Amino acid sequence: MTVTTGNDLPGYEITAVLGEVFGLTVRTRHLGSQIGASLKSLVGGELRGMTQMLAEGRQEAIERLREEAGALGADAIIAMRFDSSDFAQMGTEICAYGTAVRAVRR
């Protein structure tokens, strides 16, 4: 399934808009990451454990987004975006969202 941040699909005609779809995941930070992040904040630099957690969370959110769109019979998702926020001070919520559409090649 094609997923794009654009509002259209070049070379395709959107024949139906099926609605907004979401893919959500909440990732917790384990104690080792928390301690490492606290120490790293003293000297600066990338928090590799956190970066990996967020990258994996985004991939999972996109897969769930595709599943929800597929259940609606969509061929593609347009205008895809990410949102994230802290969750209960122990994790991060990652949301992928967009518009599920049916599209045919021109």
Image (cartoon, rainbow, N blue to C red):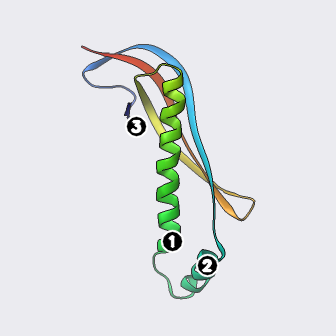
Disc 2 + disc 1, Cβ < 8 Å: yes
Disc nearer the start of the sequence (3/1):
3
**Relative to 77, 97 lies left or right:** right
Which residue is under mark 1?
49
Q: Name the residue at the right extreme.
A: 88
In this view, 53 is above or below 41: above
Name the amino acid type tagged 3.
Answer: Thr
Q: Which mark is residue 32?
A: 2
Residue located at (48% from left, 56% from top): 56
What distance separates the C-alpha of mark 2 from that of mark 1?
9 Å
- Image check: 45 left or right of 25? left
In the image, taking residue 26 as reference, residue 12 lies left or right, namely: left
Residue 20: image location, x then y, percent = 56, 27
Quarter of the N terminus within the rendering:
top left
State the SS at label 3: loop
- Residue 45: give x, y in percent of width and height: 46, 80
Residue 35: image x %, image y %? 63, 81
**Residue carrying label 3:** 5
Disc 2 marks which amino acid? Gly
Q: Nearer the viewer, residue 20 or 58?
A: 58
Which sits in the foreground, 49 or 45? Answer: 49
Location of residue 12 in the rendering, given as x and y in whole percent from the top left corner: 29, 19
Q: As displayed, is residue 47 above or below residue 3?
A: below
- Residue visible at 46% across and 75% down in the picture: 46
In front: label 3 or label 1: 1
Name the image quarter holding residue 37. Answer: bottom right
Residue occupying the point 48% across, 42% down: 62
Cα–Cα gap, marks 2 and 3: 35 Å
Q: From what the image shows, is residue 79 above or below residue 51? A: above
Q: Amino acid at mark 1?
A: Gly
